[in-house]
Image (cartoon, helix red, strand yellow):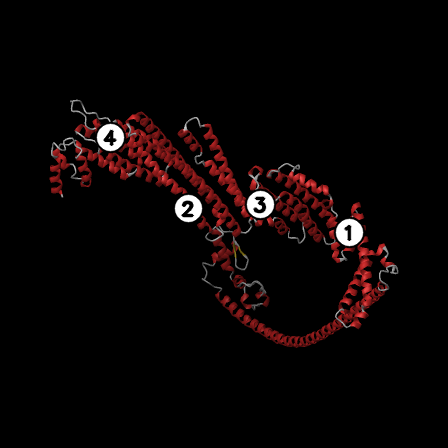
């Protein structure tokens, strides 16, 4: 907007608005301020004065001007004048501005119309131009497509021409070569055995490779031609007969050339000229794929042709001739020998890689030759399969030495095969070849293993028997019974011997695991070997228990002699001595059997632990094998359990026989019927009771140590019942008065305290009832009826006891008790 000139009559001048006032950042407040401020001077002065009174130096107006103090003064003066005298001027200004704004809008609308019209015209021209361009581009694309198709056609034509040219060139080359081959074939077809008229090519040493290649081609062609002529008619066969001469001459030439190359190869090998060797090997590869050269190279290695190498191998592994090698020495020797072989093969591998065009094939032949010749020769000397009918004696190592040698050789040879595989052996199945070296031994291995275990067992039994005989002979002066006892004790079951059986079996299982790669085969062999252990342990501990039972039987026979001899009074002293000897023999045999039972239990536990730790996991791959072995183990051990049961019964008989002897010898009639002399009653147990309890305490110490679990409980319960019965039978022989009843009660208490150590509730109950029964000798006759009111179950035994009272007849207890029992029933 253009500003007007400042004068007092601004309302008479026209208001001019410009379009530029509305461009850019338009502000209505600024536009309004510019229009109004110049028309209100008095208002501006009053505003300035007001600002001064308020301490304001100046204020910014909306149009950007600063309101000064003069403006404030004018504003203040105007307050006394009319309220708004410039209103007319402002109204006129606003009307003029509105008119000009309308004019400006019309101008703008006209310009916009013209611009729209012009834009429409330009847009139509642009669309027309685009349409023409699209048509041109489509035409260009069509031209490119035709050009691409033409180029593709030309390329295909050029490729066909190139293929034809290449084919023609190949045919030309083939025809040229064929002409050359036919010319050479005619030379070989001249006359049989005549190789003197050949082209210089076949005699030039510098062109040996070319000559070998051509000779192989000629021989192949001639042999194929003869092969086609064989089924033809006679005339065709006759026409091809001339090529047979060529084939013969070619074969002769190839053999001569191959021998010449091999000779050159050997000479270069001795001089270690690897380049010459490689050249010869490459040429020889055209003859039967170089097999003759490979085999010739391997066959000429010193380790296959030097006899001293073979002898050195034998000395290193087996030692000096005439000495028996041990498995440990053989293991060390094989380790050294196989390390030497591996190092030699590794050195040869370096040469082979540098010389032969097919090194893997040569390595396969080399490793196969090593295993089949050098290793096999040594194994044949090391492993001589023994006869199962007449096995070697244990003094020479027995079957076990052969099995240990076999295991060592197999393990070390397997390690060799892995080392050779690491070095390189081509496509050779070195593991399978190694297995085949031991196939003859592995086929009969299970039988040899079981036979070895049986041989070891028999040798151990013979050793133990010899030791027993030696001890028996050395103790011959002791006396027959004592000497037999010493010999028997020396032949007791030994846990160390059973442990040795297990160690043999464990060693056999380790070999079985080594030789059996299939889980099913391993499980079958393990089961058979473990069965051998079960049979050995069962037989050994059963024989030991039977020997211990024999001692019990001998002691019983001695007691029978003592009983028979005791009838005669003239031999009373001899009878007493025999009784003591029988008692000593019985106690010794009892202890020996208890030791046998304890060692039997320990032996069975060792076998069970061995089965759980080492055998069971090997049987799991085969269904039912584990359960079958467990059942077999239980069945095999049942024989020993039967012998142990019979022996324990004999032990009870032995103990009770001695108890009865002591009671018969020590129990006096006066023990339970002491005279009524006014003396105080004796509250000590009788001498017989003391002797019996002392004997039982001494002899049963072995049973407490040897037995455990249910076996111990069953044995002590049976012994307690037998002791109860024996005491009742013993007391039936005596008469009791009241003081004797007190003495009996003291004995029963002593017996009861002892049997309480049995931990058998049924036995304890029986001895408690005995204590109640003893009261029948103590109470007055009239009080007998009150004794059994709470325990009616012992009336029958009480009846028998009452009959032993001293006053049974004098007090007429028979009739009194008869009426008592009848009334209670």
Mark found first going from the N terminus, 2 or 4: 2
Picture residue at 65% right of the left edge, 40% below the top: 317
Q: Quadrant of the N terminus?
A: bottom right
- Circle 3: element type: loop
Mark found first going from the N terminus, 2 or 1: 1
Query: Taking the image as drawn, is residue 73 in sight?
Result: no
**What residue did someone put label 3 on?**
387
**Mark linked to residue 278:** 1
**What residue did someone put label 2 on?**
634
Q: Quadrant of residue 483?
A: top left
**What residue did someone put label 4 on?**
747
How crowded is the residue under tag 3: few (<14 C-alpha within 10 Å), some, or many (20+)? few
Query: Taking the image as drawn, is residue 201 in sight?
Result: yes
How crowded is the residue under tag 4: few (<14 C-alpha within 10 Å), some, or many (20+)? many
- Circle 4: element type: helix
Residue 218, given in percent of the width and then of the height, sits at 80, 63
Mark found first going from the N terminus, 2 or 3: 3
Disc 2 + disc 4, Cβ < 8 Å: no
Residue 40, given in percent of the width and then of the height, sits at 51, 61
């Amino acid at each position: 907007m253009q500003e007007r000139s400042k004068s007092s009559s601004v309302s008479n001048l026209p208001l001019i608005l410009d379009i530029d006032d509305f461009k850019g950042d338009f502000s209505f407040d600024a536009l309004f301020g510019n229009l109004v401020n110049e028309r209100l001077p008095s208002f501006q002065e009053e505003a300035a004065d007001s600002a001064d009174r308020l301490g304001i130096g100046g204020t910014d107006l909306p149009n950007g001007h600063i309101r000064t103090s003069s403006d404030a003064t004018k504003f203040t003066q105007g307050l006394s004048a009319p309220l708004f005298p410039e209103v007319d001027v402002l109204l006129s200004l606003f009307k003029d501005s509105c008119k000009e704004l309308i004019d400006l809008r019309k101008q703008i609308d006209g310009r916009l119309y013209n611009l729209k019209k012009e834009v429409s015209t330009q847009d139509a021209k642009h669309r027309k131009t685009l349409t023409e361009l699209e048509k041109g581009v489509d035409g260009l694309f069509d031209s490119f497509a035709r050009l691409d198709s033409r180029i593709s056609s030309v390329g295909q034509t050029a490729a066909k021409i190139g293929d034809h040219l290449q084919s023609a060139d190949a045919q030309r080359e083939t025809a040229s070569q064929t002409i050359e081959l036919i010319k050479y074939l005619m030379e070989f077809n001249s006359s049989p055995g005549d190789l003197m008229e050949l082209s210089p090519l076949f005699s030039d040493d510098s062109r040996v490779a070319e000559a070998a290649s051509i000779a192989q081609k000629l021989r192949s062609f001639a042999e194929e031609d003869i092969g086609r002529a064989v089924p033809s008619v006679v005339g065709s066969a006759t026409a091809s007969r001339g090529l047979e001469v060529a084939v013969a001459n070619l074969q002769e030439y190839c053999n001569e050339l191959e021998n010449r190359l091999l000779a050159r190869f050997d000479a270069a090998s001795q001089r270690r000229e690897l380049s010459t060797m490689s050249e010869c090997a490459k040429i020889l590869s055209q003859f039967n794929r170089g097999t003759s050269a490979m085999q010739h190279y391997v066959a000429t290695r010193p380790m296959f042709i030097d006899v001293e190498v073979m002898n050195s191998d034998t000395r290193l592994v087996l030692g000096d001739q005439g000495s028996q090698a041990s498995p440990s020495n053989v293991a060390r020797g094989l380790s050294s020998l196989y390390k030497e072989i591996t190092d030699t093969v590794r050195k040869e591998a370096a040469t082979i890689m540098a010389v032969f065009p097919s090194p893997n094939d040569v390595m396969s032949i080399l490793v196969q030759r090593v295993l089949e010749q050098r290793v096999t020769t040594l194994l044949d000397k090391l492993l001589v399969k023994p006869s199962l009918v007449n096995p070697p004696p244990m003094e020479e190592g027995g079957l076990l030495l052969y099995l240990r040698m076999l295991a060592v050789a197999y393990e070390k040879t397997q390690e060799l095969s892995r080392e050779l595989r690491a070095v390189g052996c081509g496509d050779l199945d070195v593991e399978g070849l190694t297995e085949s070296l031991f196939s003859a031994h592995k086929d009969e291995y299970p039988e040899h293993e079981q036979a070895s275990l049986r041989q070891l067992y028999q040798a151990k039994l013979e050793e133990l028997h010899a030791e027993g005989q030696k001890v028996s002979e050395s103790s011959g002066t002791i006396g027959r019974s004592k000497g037999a006892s010493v010999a028997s004790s020396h032949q007791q079951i030994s846990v160390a011997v059973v442990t040795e059986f297990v160690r043999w079996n464990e060693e056999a299982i380790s070999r079985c695991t080594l030789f059996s790669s299939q889980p099913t085969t391993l499980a079958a062999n393990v089961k058979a070997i473990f069965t051998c252990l079960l049979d050995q342990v069962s037989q050994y501990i059963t024989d030991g228990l039977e020997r211990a039972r024999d001692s019990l039987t001998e002691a019983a026979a001695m007691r029978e002699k003592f009983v028979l001899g005791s009838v005669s009074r003239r031999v009373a002293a001899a009878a007493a001595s025999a009784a003591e000897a029988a008692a000593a023999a019985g106690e010794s045999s009892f202890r020996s059997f208890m030791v046998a039972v304890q060692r039997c239990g320990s032996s069975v536990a060792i076998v069970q632990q061995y089965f759980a730790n080492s055998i069971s996991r090997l049987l799991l791959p085969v269904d039912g094998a584990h359960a079958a072995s467990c059942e077999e183990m239980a069945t095999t051990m049942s024989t020993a359990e039967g012998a142990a049961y019979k022996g324990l019964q004999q032990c009870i008989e032995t103990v009770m026989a001695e108890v009865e002897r002591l009671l018969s010898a020590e129990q006096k009639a006066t023990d339970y019927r002491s005279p009524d002399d006014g003396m105080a009653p004796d509250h000590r147990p009788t001498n017989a009771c003391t002797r019996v309890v002392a004997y039982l305490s001494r002899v049963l110490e072995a049973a407490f140590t040897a037995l455990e679990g249910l076996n111990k409980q069953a044995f002590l319960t049976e012994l307690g019942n037998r002791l109860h019965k024996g005491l009742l039978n013993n007391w039936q022989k005596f008469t009791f008065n009241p003081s004797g009843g007190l003495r009996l009660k003291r004995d029963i208490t002593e017996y009861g305290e002892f049997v309480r150590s049995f931990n058998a509730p049924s036995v304890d109950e029986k001895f408690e009832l005995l204590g109640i029964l003893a009261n029948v000798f103590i109470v007055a006759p009239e009080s007998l009826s009150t004794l059994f009111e709470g325990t009616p179950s012992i009336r029958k035994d009480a009846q028998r006891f009452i009959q032993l009272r001293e006053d049974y007849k004098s007090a007429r207890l028979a009739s009194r008790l008869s009426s008592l029992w009848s009334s209670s029933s």
